[in-house]
Amino acid sequence: MAERIEADYLRWNEFDKTARVASHSDVGVIELMPIADAAQFAFKYVNGHPSNHRHGLPTVMAFGVLADVETGAPRLLSELTLTTAIRTAAMSALAARVLARPDSTRMALVGNGAQSEFQALAFRDLVGIRELRLFDTDPAASAKLAANLVGQGLQVRICTSTAEAVKGADIVTTVTADKANATILTREMIEPGMHVNAVGGDCPGKTELHRGVLEAGSVFVEFEPQTRIEGDIQQMPANFQVTEFWRVLSGQATGRSSAAQVTVFDSVGFALEDYSALTFMRDAAAELGIGEIVELVPEATDPKNLFGVLRDEPRPVAASAALVASAIAPARRAAETA
């Protein structure tokens, strides 16, 4: 997944990009995230409701669609709840591989909810993290994460505060869920050479970093117009300098310039990553021979006579007017190989 995201970021200028469309409420947010290149249009439907556990539902739920630009015909309908967790972790690890010190082995993971296992395993495999320090305001969340990571080749320690978890860490990942202007990290917690992977702040009014953390380092973002609204930099003035990550990947901008530099990846999640995830899922489903044809578009004898569909006898679904619906299996396979 990280390789697919990197390849798509390297063709950044080929995409028609826009910030996501969001509908906010007091209890959460529902969003649409569109993007397209010359051949394919993609979108993700996703929510964020931190109190969903009270209803027996995940905080984040998502699905996505791939369609042909030439005809507008939908070609893939896929779950993106598990896949979003995988692509978010893959993006975090990709950014850290570029921005963090290459000798980084110790990570603090603050916020031990549904995303945390994916972050831990991606950083283990793609960055070389071997020691994790965990903290969550809910001790049960840290206990859950530690139990799920048993046998995964990681040294895990549960801490009693953010400050304890962060002290001596090479990388700090914050992935909290509360929709609030929180101060998870403060300037005095930041040590020379740290890389901060700020994942939890992803909508207006939701931040994790004290502004002093942002002022202490070089800040990198996915799509600046979106991050200005949703990311931790929403609390900074409009002229606060940031660098879009694709420019570092393509060699047009400098990432880390010294071992002592503090780097911050202010990640809010961008539609390009979902495009990468959807094409990855499409190819995985085809390779594994899974998925099913779903008639989302009526098959008409005369495409100019839509009403005639109501009178026609039912016919077998034609692949040209259908979607491949990929379920949990490709996501599970992807998780095993991420």
Image (cartoon, helix red, strand yellow):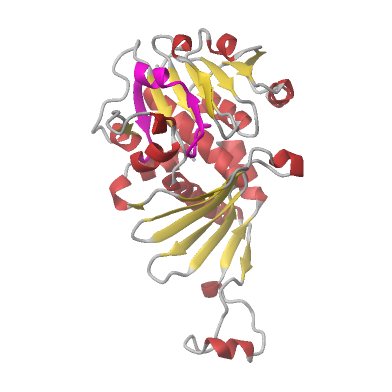
Closest to the observer, 24 or 137: 24
| Residue at 35% in and 10% down | 260
Q: Is residue 60 magenta?
A: no
**Residue 86 horizontal/vertical position (percent):** 56, 39
Can I make out residue 100 in this image?
no
Q: Is 337 left or right of 8, judged from the image as shown? A: right
Camera-side residue of 68 and 3: 68
Q: Taking 267 as reference, is 140 above or below it?
A: above
Residue 235 is drawn in which quadrant?
top left
Q: Position of residue 133 (x, y in %)?
A: 60, 15
Q: Residue 118: which quarter of the image?
A: top right
Q: Give the magenta part as a residue range.
A: 199-223
Residue farthest left in this picture: 252
The quadrant of the rendering that contains the C terminus is top right
Left-right relation of 165 to 194:
right
Compared with 252, 319 (above or below) is below
How far across and down, in percent of the image, does residue 223 sit?
36, 41
Number of numbered discs on residues: 0
Instruction: Please check the rendered image and state whether residue 209 is part of the magenta-colored stretch, yes or no.
Output: yes
233 or 264: which is nearer to us? 233
Q: In the image, residue 13 lies at what x, y percent?
A: 28, 48
Say if residue 58 shows up in the picture: yes
At horizontal 51% and vertical 34% (from top left) the residue drawn is 206
State whether residue 185 is above or below residue 98: above
Residue appearing at x 68%, y 42% in the figure: 58
